[in-house]
Amino acid sequence: MLLDALGLSPALDVLDVGAGDGRLVRELARRGHAGRAVGVDLTPGPGVQPASAEALPFPDASFDVVLFVRVLAHLPDPARALAEARRVLRPGGQVWDAAHGPVHLRATWAALGQPLAPGDTLPESALTVTCPLTVTGDDARFLLGTYGKEAEVSPHLFPVQDAAQLLVWSLAP
């Protein structure tokens, strides 16, 4: 649904920063994306390259689109990560950021040194994308692990049907 909302041309070279297990990169491939689709993450999954968002291992002007999906506010130096994204971005390219709702949006902007006041509105370029999702017991264990936690997951509680709302906006180069 996020890719549908962004409407990326299939010829663009796309970098997914904080790609995790590479689902977005795999989805681009599944859709027949003809451009390069590269994912990077400190703890990469299959098909994702190990790299820090603050020190991307690519030459200047390597990508048409850089994506930060639910990651920018959680980085040690989000301003440096954004500078790196802009460095690897080709002229006329776009950097997109997605956050989980208004609280995560505020955390992202604060992390970039531009805190939003309580009455501030979303950036003009913002899109709202609601994604239905299914959480399995394995997903729950994985998510807990990303927070350094372990727990017994009761199989009779899963799968859980839910939805995630993403606020998505373009961060001008």
Image (tube, rainbow, N blue to C red):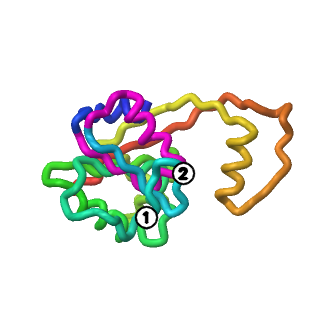
- Camera sees residue 123: no
Pointer 1: residues within 10 angstroms few (<14), some, or many (20+)?
some
The residue that appears at 27% across and 34% down in the rendered structure is: 34
Q: Is residue 46 above or below residue 173?
A: above
Residue at position x 73%, y 30% in the image = 159
In the image, the segment drawn in magenta is 12-34
Say left or right for 98 vs 101: left
Q: Residues within 10 Å of mark 2 (few under 14, many from 20)?
A: some
Q: Is residue 129 magenta?
A: no
Of helix, strand and loop, which one carries label 2? Answer: loop
What SS does tag 1 mark? loop
Measured from the top left, where is residue 51 in percent x and y? 43, 64
Name which of mark 1 and mark 2 comes first in the sequence.
2
Q: Measuring 29% from the left and 44% from the top, which residue is drawn there?
A: 36
Towards the viewer: 144 or 62:
62
- The kind of residue tagged 2 is Gly
Image quarter for residue 6? top left
Q: Would you say 133 lies left or right of 58 here?
A: right
Query: Taking 86 as reference, is 134 left or right?
Result: right
Seen in the picture, residue 75 relative to 101 is either above or below; the reply is: below
According to the image, label 2 marks what residue? 45
In the displayed structure, does residue 37 sit left or right of residue 42? Answer: left
Where is the N terminus found, in terms of image quarters? Answer: top left
The residue located at (52%, 56%) in the rendering is 44
Residue beneath disc 1: 51
- Amino acid type of the residue that numbered disc 1 sits on in the rendered structure: Ala
Q: Nearer the viewer, residue 110 or 163?
A: 163
